[in-house]
Image (cartoon, helix red, strand yellow):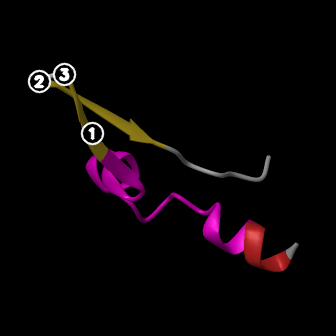
Amino acid sequence: MGLLKAKSNMSAKSARDILLGDFKEFTFSGTKSGVGQVEVWI
């Protein structure tokens, strides 16, 4: 639980860092797409 709470602290990160932190890029039939995720504890 402590680890989840610690990594959920986004206060020191920029919006760009949050978006690209776990971002994966894929190409489907020549079309680029991206998927990212953020896990937070509320």
- How far from the left and from the top, in percent, is residue 33? 26, 29
Residue at horizontal 11 percent and vertical 24 percent from the top? 30
Mark 1 = which residue? 26
Q: Residues within 10 Å of mark 3 (few under 14, many from 20)?
A: few
Whether tag 2 and tag 1 are in contact, CB under 8 A, the answer is no
Q: How far apart are marks 3 and 2 (CA)?
A: 4 Å
Mark 2 = which residue? 30
Residue at horizontal 26 percent and vertical 44 percent from the top? 25
Task: Give 37 or 13, whichever is nearer the viewer.
Answer: 37
Q: Distance between the residues labelled 3 and 1?
A: 10 Å
Is 8 colored magenta in this rendering? yes
Q: In this view, does 28 lie above or below 17?
A: above
Q: Residues within 10 Å of mark 2 (few under 14, many from 20)?
A: few
User: Which quarter of the picture shows residue 35?
Assistant: top left
Q: Quadrant of the N terminus?
A: bottom right
User: In the image as oriented, which residue stretches furthest toward the right?
Assistant: 1
- How far from the left and from the top, in percent, is residue 20? 31, 52
* Three-letter amino acid code at the position of disc 2: Gly
Residue at horizontal 39 percent and vertical 60 percent from the top? 13
* Three-letter amino acid code at the position of disc 3: Ser
What kind of element bears circle 3? loop
In the picture provided, is 39 more to the left or to the right than 23?
A: right
Mark 3 = which residue? 29
Region in magenta: 5-24
Q: Distance between the residues labelled 2 and 1?
A: 10 Å
Q: In this view, does 27 lie above or below 7?
A: above
Residue 9 visible, this orientation:
yes
What kind of element bears circle 2? loop
Residue 14 visible, this orientation:
no
* Three-letter amino acid code at the position of disc 1: Phe
- How far from the left and from the top, in percent, is residue 5? 75, 67
Whether tag 3 and tag 2 are in contact, CB under 8 A, the answer is yes
